[in-house]
Image: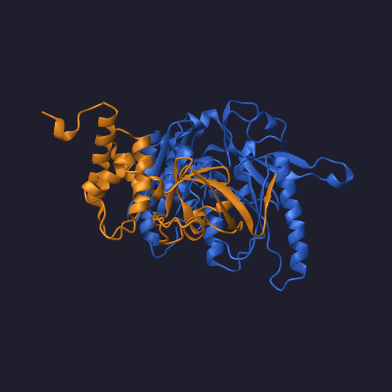
Amino acid sequence: MIPGDVVYLKPESAEEAVEAWSLANAASAAAGAASARGAASPRYLAGGTEILTTARRSAAYAVGALVDVKAVPEAKAAGALPDSLAGAAWLGEAAGGAPYGADGLYFGAALPLAELEDGPLFPLLSNAARGVADRTTRNRLSLGGNVAGQLPYREAVLPLLAAGALGYSALPGDAPAAGGAKLRLVRWGLRSRFDKRLALLPGELLLGFWVPKAATEARAAYVRKTRTGPIDYPLITLCALRTRSGAAWALGGAFPYPARSDEADGALSEALSASGDARAGALGRAAAALGEPRSDQRAGAEYRAALIALALETVAEELA
Amino acid sequence: MTERKGPYELRLRVNGEERAALTRPAETLLRLLRERLGLTGPKCGCENGDCGACTVLIDGVPTKSCMVLAVECEGRELTTIEGLRDHPVQRAFSAENGFQCGFCTPGMIMNAVALVRAHPEPNEEADRNWMGSNLCRCTGYEGIRRALAAARAELAARAGLMPRAKERP
């Protein structure tokens, strides 16, 4: 149960969803100005697991309105890129990044992780999805909620980072009041907007991710270590893909956020074509490029570092 | 666009019947089932999505009802343990002693019903994956494992795929 009252809105298009968020936000700001508790921001809802558990735990996590996006077609699509997103503008400076129009697969942000787990489209994403929570909970947990959530682990983002995925989202139009477009559909490179967490603008609706087919079909490696059994937060989760230039990988669990870097990719790529001390040195540089792992009640930094070293060896063997 | 706020009458289909109840959008499905519809089969264990005691089927998909808002279930088909009538999984849990204190049993059974439907053949990996969603504080897992096997055998026998154990030569 969410403390207090909320307004529930269920739009049937991205345009309705963004408009509903904007209206709810304006209403909430007006109400918040007259309230000692301040404004309770509207939130997009797909699986809702994090919203429900956080709201129950913390009075500081105020929820004013919930905009349920499960009926937004682009958020539930899987496979081909929805036609409505074909004209999405590039967000950011120089246009480009990943090639648009190339062969690839699209995964809607409201898809439940269990559906991705069972789907054959992108095996590395299936593996990463299977690592999150338990099966029944994954029937609710959504891809977008996991990627954009507040928990440190967010394992579903790891294969997307390794694959150099594109993100698609919807933003309020520039001047709808003046008769302009109500909605701006944009695409962006996930790596460029993900620094410890996904940077979304207020009201921005995450619609889904597009992954190049070269990545979905590439040789992949997945290593996940927990303290107890499969249903536990990860000490480390490593997702890696063989790429044209070598390898790309992302690491979760070791830090309070998912991590990757070009330097780490470069070092792992080097290791794939090296042997002996050169290989060991390259793997060491790959691990060091992401920084020192954290210590917490689950594992110390040294133990996590040892797990990363072992995982990188496994990955290098599997990708070589 | 659908909009719901304040107390309102929610209509939904539970265990094959049309039901209506006064609710608020902030209320979870678990609270609605137990406190407004009197369906106390789904148990309130952790209310945090961890234990699985509140598992129900939404359109056939096992779901922890403490993690769903009731308002999201408009127009959906819900099944709680009260909606099962002498189901082979229920009989198997009884026959194989698949419970101890019984608190986790409704959630276990609802998940098992969906599991054997999705995986009618024995499948240890699927069993571990799916049933790992439900905790038994009494640790009665061995009986639950036997119950799954017995339920599958019963369902297979019904489908004419294999003879019941007692009928085998």
Q: Is B65 placed above or below B130 here?
A: below
Quadrant for the C terminus of chain B, please: top left
- Percent position (x, y) of residue B12? 55, 47
Q: Is residue B6 above or below residue A168?
A: below
Chain A: its colour in the image is blue
Q: Report the residue at 59% width, 69% height from top.
A: A59
Residue in front for this viewpoint, A138 or B118:
B118
Here the colouring is by chain
Q: Residue at x 14, y 35 (%)?
A: B166
Q: Is residue A101 above or below residue A290?
A: above
* Residue farthest right in this picture: A178
Q: Nearer the viewer, residue B123 or A106?
A: B123
The front one of A206 and B84 is B84
Residue A114 seen from this side: yes
Q: Quick one: which residue is furthest to the bottom in this view?
A: A36
Q: Which lettered chain is shown in orange?
A: B
Relative side of A66 to B141, left or right: right
Task: Confirm whether residue A278 shows in the render.
Answer: no
Left or right, B114 with reference to A174: left
